[in-house]
Amino acid sequence: MGVVNTTFETFFSTSVPPFLGSSLIWYRDSTVVMSIPRVRFASKNNEPAVRSDTIMHYLFIDLKSKSFYQYGTFTDTAALQKSYWQPDSLYIDGGWNFYYDKNVVMLHKPEQVEDTIISAVNYKRVKFTTLENESRGGYSIGYIRCDRGRSMFSREKNYSDSINCSMDIIESYNKITNNKEVTTSTEFLRDLLNEEEIKVFDTWEGYAKKHPPKEKKLK
């Protein structure tokens, strides 16, 4: 159990400002709660756009049954907004996709590159290409940590399973310019839940066991 922060950052060109989005995820066993963010930009009278970040809702997910329960607040008294289940071929709207390994498929054996240390964590690094990279003329660098084993938050599953480690960071590069275009990362904030967070999990998990979703999300 614990809490992680997932981030998505873009650096496409000097004419397009970098964008950073993030989402907190609380997890316990095979259930998780993720915050679903909304980012808006607004400008007046040709002034620079002002960014505002809000939380649209929270998703409680039973990963084994692929059941989703949406709440407006992260409290044990929050009212359910809706529930549904979906196949793992669909993306999770606005949040982390635990089934993303279906889309991160290495075309060739990854190439080992120099290790690095970030915030006192030693990362092995590999260079690889996916179908998505190849279609855009790019490649990726994956940052792998092995001190925690293979976690459910690994951004690539098959290779991570084979070495029992987690790919916590993926940087995507343009093959021609070697410029970094996108970074996705996972940061482990703590390995425990506080009393209030445990109450939320107990309440929402208890409800989910008694009320399986009746609706299927199709797209």
Image (cartoon, rainbow, N blue to C red):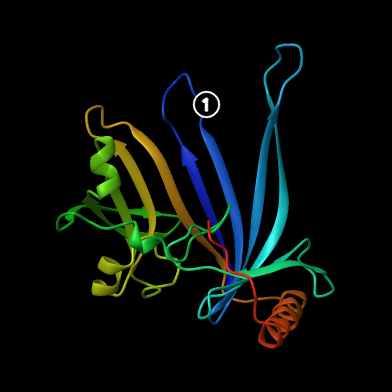
Residue 69 can be seen, yes or no: no
Q: Which residue is mark 1?
A: 17
22 on left or right of 9: right
Q: Is residue 182 above or below residue 149?
A: above
Q: In front: 140, or 206?
A: 206
Residue 21 placement: quadrant: top right
95 is higher (above) or lower (below) than 16? below
Decide: is 157 above or below 103: below
Q: Give how far across and how far down residue 121 sits, in percent.
A: 40, 61
Q: In x, y percent, where is residue 145?
A: 35, 65
**What residue is rendered at 25% in x and 66% in y?**
159
**Viewer-nearest residue: 125 or 128:** 128
Residue drawn at point x = 22 percent, y = 48 percent: 129
Residue 4 x %, y %: 56, 63
Q: Furthest-top residue in view?
A: 45
Image quadrant occupied by the N terminus = bottom right
The residue that appears at 75% across and 79% down in the rendered structure is: 195
Question: Which quarter of the picture shows residue 100?
Answer: bottom left
Question: Total of numbered circles in the picture?
Answer: 1
Label 1 crowd bin: few (<14), some (14–19), many (20+), radius 10 Å: few
Residue occupying image coordinates x 41% and y 29%: 12
User: Left of 184 or right of it: where is 130?
Assistant: left
| Three-letter residue code for mark 1 | Pro
